[in-house]
Image (tube, helix red, strand yellow):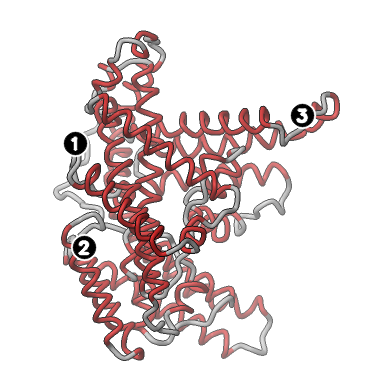
Amino acid sequence: MIFNSFEFLIFFPIVVMINFILPQKIRYIWLLLASWYFYMSWNPVYIILLLTSTTVTYIAGLCIEYDRRKKQKDSIREKRRIGKKYLVISLIILLGILGFFKYFDFILNGLNMILSIFRAEAIKSSFSIVLPVGISFYTLQSIGYLIDVYRGDIYAEKNFLRYALFVSFFPQLVAGPIERSKNLLVQLYKPQRFSWDNCARGILLMLYGFFLKVVIADKAAIIVNTVYENPMQYPGFYIAIATFFFAMQIYCDFYGYSTIARGAALVFGIKLMSNFEAPYFSRGIKEFWRRWHISLSGWFMDYLYIPLGGNRKGWLRQQGNLMTVFAVSGLWHGASIAFVIWGVLNGAYQVVGNICKKIKEKMDKLLPQNTESISVRIRQRVTTFLLVGFAWMFFRAGTWEVLQDVWSNLFHFNWYVLLDGSIYELGVTEEFFRMLLFFIVILFAVDYKKYKGCDVVEAFMRQEWWFRLVGYVLLLFVIILFGCYGVEYDTSQFIYFQF
């Protein structure tokens, strides 16, 4: 079951109605059952993995908490030393499960590559592994909870079912945002009464999320797939155009999912964190990663970058930590060398930026400039977008073989495609191509207001009732006409389901 499916349109209203009919004390049990059903709709067998992850971290959290209270008179170091064994054991189990399902084929192919060098017989696998949906997300969320308990930031949750809901809450179970226990788990203690205001805001967020997904992302995917599935037939500017639309596709696809998740949760009175803050208006790579996939960036910052030493161990160590974090981020996204290159490239952007920072400061003293001038802001944003877009090319290629084809054909410049109309032959009609660009302009207009600090939802909700009604109807009309039943309609899963 996916958000943009007919099944979800039936499932969600039923869950909401029953939730607010039930007594507040048992609502979390109903939400847990609904969340498990939602997850099992993909493959019932994989509920075993979700329950395993939940049980392991629940028990480990209690053990860490028990040791902390038992050793209250001991030093902090002693308490952490004792609690550490439970943390390490649980991390080995969780990462072992994730590694097996996500990286078994990747490791096997690497071993076979090494064996081929020595002309040894390749290792053949007698079974195929299907990656469970959402396993990367709920694994990181569970690990974050354990580390928070270990650090003493929160108390271990004693109610197994409530903790299970924290891990399994269906709006954000499959693709995030990766919630912190200090936010989501705390809210699960206080069941909210039904609120028309929360419902109206939630539905608005869901409609905008569907607009991003089915109207922009899924339609941009047609152009992207046409080129990237046959890169040798589309040289130069075709690849550049497809890469631009992939930047739009992955943003609207993932931003769309996160927005629908936030809206669905808000209907229940639960506030999830914002996962995107107008990232394509960033004026530097560092700012981009503060605005893109915020929950994952924050997770790596708190649970990997800082434990590695952050910026406390000297300048060189800091750059090494940055590269490590982005390399791991690339590997987390996919078991392929192309994803690792994508991660390393983004890390290299930041390292080079740090190296050039002092040079830039000296140049600014010699040639003073107004950093807030329009020309500077445009240059910084265009440069950042081009660097990010170049990295997206590796991400979309996915495999080394496709990446080689794309790279070999990228620099065959064919200026005529901008004039002969052939860019309108990439899977969509000219009219639809222009309409897609129009919707992207709307996206950027909304994002610009958001970048400037405007709460777009709040501003919309302050308008008169008739204006809000027109807004809801217009969004729904666009989704149905250009998304669900429009030209080139094709229901597709969200990109981040595969991660």
Q: Name the residue under label 1.
A: 488
Q: Which mark is residue 107?
A: none
- Left or right of 105? Residue 364 is right
1 vs 2, front mark: 1
Sort mark 2 into few (<14), some (14-19) or many (20+) by Cα contacts within 10 Å.
some
Which residue sits at x=48%, y=79%? Answer: 186
* CA distance for labels 1 and 2: 22 Å
Name the amino acid type tagged 1.
Glu
SS category of the residue bearing label 2: helix
- Left or right of 295? Residue 282 is right
Q: Residue 359 carries which label?
A: 3
At which x and y percent is residue 452?
60, 48
SS category of the residue bearing label 1: loop
Relative to 248, residue 181 above or below:
below
3 vs 2, front mark: 2
Relative to 408, residue 460 above or below:
below
Q: Residue 8 carries which label?
A: 2
Q: Nearer the viewer, residue 118 or 362?
A: 362
